[in-house]
Image: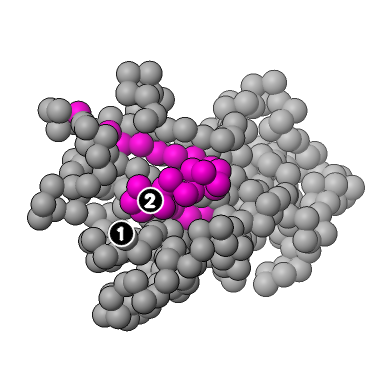
Amino acid sequence: MPEHVGAAFDMAVSEAWRFAGQTAPNPAVGCVLLDARGEVLVIAAHHKAGALHAERLAVEQAHALGVVERIHTAVVTLEPCNHTGRTPPCTEALLSTPVQTVWIGCADPNPHVPGGGAAYLQARGLDVRWLAHAANGGACLARCKALLAPFAWRMAHGRPWITVKQAVNAQGNMVPPVGSTTFTTRQSLEFAHILRRVTDGIVTGTGTIQADLPAFTVRHVPDHANRRRVLVVCGAPNKVPAHWQEQAQARFDVLFCPDCADLPAVLASTSALWVMVEAGPTLLRAISAQGLWDDWLHIRQDAQGCDHFSVSTRHDISPLSLFPQWARCTQEQACFPVL
């Protein structure tokens, strides 16, 4: 794989990652268009469901910039669609340009739509190349897979990707000091809100609501404009204050799940691709017992008030790996193992 193609994949993933958390039920996808010398012409991504897919947006931007005739190579994180949904096929958008080579990160995992985007392009004379077949494409492929992971898991298993966030103090206690709702540092708090931003919903328990009356909104970092997420509350509606329910329903699609065993079905009824669990020890024990999680982020505060990250994952790839904090998680894992 040429160096400029690898750089283009990094740009495509980074651009798509900016919109993670608002594309559901569609995946986050990035596309970069290059000229024959490998210079970047356009960087685009799918912004949200109903908006243009990454490839078609890239082509439209190329037209607007007057560079469409210079297009030689398209780099896409996901196989271009070859069907008409809310928008026309991305294969046709690419074929409307002089593109000669298309590099693809991941195959389309959606079993509910006609596939064959890569084969369709190849049959029309384009040189279609896959990261998986490139001798030096492993790092780029891992990033593309991490970007696609929540969507791919949803397509294969019918439920969203589930990330558990658990913060504990030096004694392993999850209960903050009296008068506070957290004991983690501001840096960790910002990370928690960044996580909320990229996910499509929150799972919590009635005990957490009774204790903290949490808003579950994205703060400390800018959120996607007009984003309305899912909020699943494990427990009965009569276990939480009516005024909290009223406020939550103004911001979220609130669903109650009286029996934690029904949580997979409740999550499957939503359009969410990725949800985060923010709850107390009772619900976390139930989720752990059911194996109903995909990665588990631990934030452990030491006696000096410093936070240490570690993470468990049930898969060979995780969307958490796209965060800069992933390196910190893996570095601190050995010294501060998962509890």
The residue where tag 1 is placed is: 208
Q: Is 234 inside the magenta-drawn segment?
A: no
* Amino acid of disc 1: Thr
Q: Residue at x 23, y 61 (%)?
A: 212
81 versus 333 height, above or below = below
Q: Nearer the viewer, residue 275 or 37?
A: 275
Q: Is 299 inside the magenta-drawn segment?
A: yes
Q: Residue at x 30, y 80 (%)?
A: 242
The residue where tag 2 is placed is: 282
* Amino acid of disc 2: Thr
Left/right placement of residue 121 relative to residue 263 reads: right
142 versus 274 height, above or below = above
The residue stretch that appears in magenta: 274-302
| Secondary structure state at the residue bearing disc 1 | helix
241 versus 8 height, above or below = below
Q: Position of residue 68 (x, y in %)?
A: 63, 54
